[in-house]
């Protein structure tokens, strides 16, 4: 459903001129006059020279409106681009395109950016490279429908923002990749790496759904409503996008610590059999492997006292002793089992993405507990404190975009 067309079919292209310097009345007016040195591969908000109405009427000049796309055709800046945020005239080394209806100017800009080297190669052959207007208007561009042009632009600019953030963070934290990763995660969970889309809806709408989902989980997992969670106040830690919502960490799901020490001791363990239930330990969280371990209890004791500590596929287990703060999402088809005293179990509501939840947990809890010295986390906050920490809630679709974006970024780091 795309079509190959000539660049001359997507807009009106025109080069400018340089009014004679021997005519003082042509200069120091109010009309912006752009030279190729003003191009910056981005939006143009100002120029270095201005001409007069007399120059505009007597010289070969056109006022290019806001939104026009510009390219330098020769000289030291050949191939440089710009998009106008102000109306300007240009010199003869700059070619400007006023796009036709149905053409997204940012799509054209990114296409020219992508094709820049090829245009320059086409201009070789004379004393200096020269991308003439004729070369430009006869060149081909693959043209998608307008809605898809806009989607492509959104995706490309999202990637560019991500790359800019990575570049800035790498420059600042190049000596310590762990600090770099932490800074990227922080940027992600603050909404700085992704674009907020109206089609995602709002976190306020999602929050109502979360309340019902958490109530269902509590009922299913033999829990009780937690009355220790406080309302959100005005002491939120930072600004978040308008369609996000601050909630308390405890509202993200159902939290359960392992059984009290005397209710689960080694004397209760039995060999694995058809009538046994597995006991998951902190090594499962630390080593990210649910198949380890040899501790089991009887099914009778599970039914009698341990059902409330059962761990299911999709639950997150967190180590709470020794090596503290290690997390693991329990995969499908795990053995039926319970958590022991050294673990905390979190059942996250379906409307919160598990990976986004873990990025928040690792950044805001595990990293902050290191107190900046790089040592291992020494404790997890008490339950009442943990549940009342703030949690930035984006719409579910953006949660998934943030998790995917961070995964790609951290993989590159």
Image (cartoon, rainbow, N blue to C red):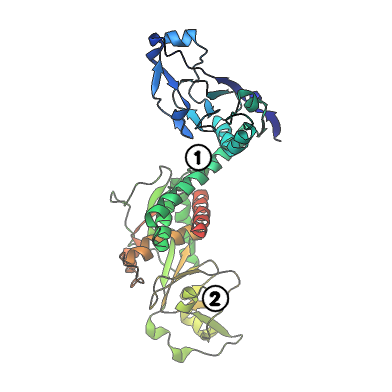
Query: Percent x, y for residue 264?
Result: 43, 84
Provide the secondary structure element on which disc 1 rests.
Answer: helix
Q: CA distance from mark 2 to mark 1?
A: 40 Å
How would you rate the neighbour count of disc 1 (Cα within 10 Å): few for under 14, some for 14-19, many for 20 or more? few
Q: Is residue 393 visible?
A: no
Disc 2 or 1, which lies upstream in sequence? 1
Which residue is farthest left?
235
Q: Residue at x 41, y 28 (%)?
A: 45
Q: Is residue 101 above or below residue 374?
A: above
Query: Percent x, y for residue 49?
Result: 39, 21
Which residue is farthest front?
127
Q: Quadrant of residue 390?
A: bottom left
Q: Residue at x 50, y 39 (%)?
A: 198
Q: Is residue 373 left or right of residue 109?
A: left
Q: Is residue 30 left or right of residue 12?
A: left
**Which numbered disc covers residue 198?**
1
Q: Is residue 164 above or below residue 72?
A: below
329 or 298, which is in the foreground? 329
Query: Percent x, y for residue 120?
Result: 60, 34
Q: Is residue 405 left or right of residue 174?
A: right
Provide the secondary structure element on which disc 2 rests.
Answer: loop
Can you identify the residue that label 2 sits on?
290
Q: Is residue 83 above or below residue 221?
A: above
19 or 411, which is in the foreground? 19
121 or 105, which is in the foreground? 121
19 or 287, which is in the foreground? 19
Q: Is residue 333 visible?
A: yes
Q: Is residue 101 above or below residue 390?
A: above
């Amino acid at each position: 459903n795309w079509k190959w067309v000539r660049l001359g079919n997507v807009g009106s292209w025109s080069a400018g001129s340089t009014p004679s310097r021997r005519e003082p009345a042509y200069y120091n007016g109010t009309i912006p006059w752009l030279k190729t040195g003003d191009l910056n591969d981005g939006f143009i908000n100002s120029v270095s020279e201005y001409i007069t109405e007399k120059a505009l009427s007597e010289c070969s000049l056109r006022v290019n409106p806001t939104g026009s796309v510009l390219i330098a055709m020769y000289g030291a800046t050949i191939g440089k681009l710009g998009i106008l945020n102000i109306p300007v005239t240009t010199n003869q080394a700059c070619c400007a395109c006023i796009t036709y209806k149905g053409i997204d100017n940012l799509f054209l800009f990114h296409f020219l950016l992508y094709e820049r080297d090829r245009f320059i190669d086409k201009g070789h052959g004379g004393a200096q490279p020269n991308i003439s207007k004729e070369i430009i208007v006869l060149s081909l561009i693959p043209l998608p429908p307008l809605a898809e042009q806009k989607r492509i632009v959104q995706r490309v600019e999202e990637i560019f923002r991500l790359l800019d953030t990575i570049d800035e963070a790498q420059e600042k934290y190049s000596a310590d990749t762990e600090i770099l990763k932490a800074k990227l995660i922080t940027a992600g969970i603050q909404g700085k790496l992704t674009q907020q889309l109206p089609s995602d809806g709002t976190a306020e709408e999602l929050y109502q759904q979360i309340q019902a989902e958490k109530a269902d989980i509590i009922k299913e997992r033999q829990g009780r409503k937690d009355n220790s969670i406080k309302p959100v106040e005005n002491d939120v830690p930072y600004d978040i996008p308008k369609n996000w919502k601050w909630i308390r960490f405890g509202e993200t799901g159902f939290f359960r610590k392992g059984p009290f020490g005397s209710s689960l001791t080694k004397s209760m363990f039995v060999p694995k059999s058809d009538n046994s239930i597995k006991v998951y330990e902190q090594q499962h969280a630390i080593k990210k492997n649910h198949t380890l371990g040899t501790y089991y209890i009887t099914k009778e004791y599970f039914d009698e006292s341990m059902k409330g500590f059962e761990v299911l596929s999709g639950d997150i287990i967190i180590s709470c002793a020794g090596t503290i703060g290690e997390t693991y999402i329990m995969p499908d088809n795990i053995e039926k089992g319970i958590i022991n005293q050294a673990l905390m179990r979190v059942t996250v509501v379906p409307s919160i993405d598990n990976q986004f939840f873990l990025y928040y947990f690792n950044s805001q809890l595990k990293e902050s507990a290191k107190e900046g010295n790089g040592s291992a986390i020494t404790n997890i906050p008490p339950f009442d404190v943990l549940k009342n920490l703030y949690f930035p809630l984006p719409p579910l679709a953006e949660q998934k975009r943030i998790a995917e974006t961070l995964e790609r970024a951290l993989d590159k780091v």
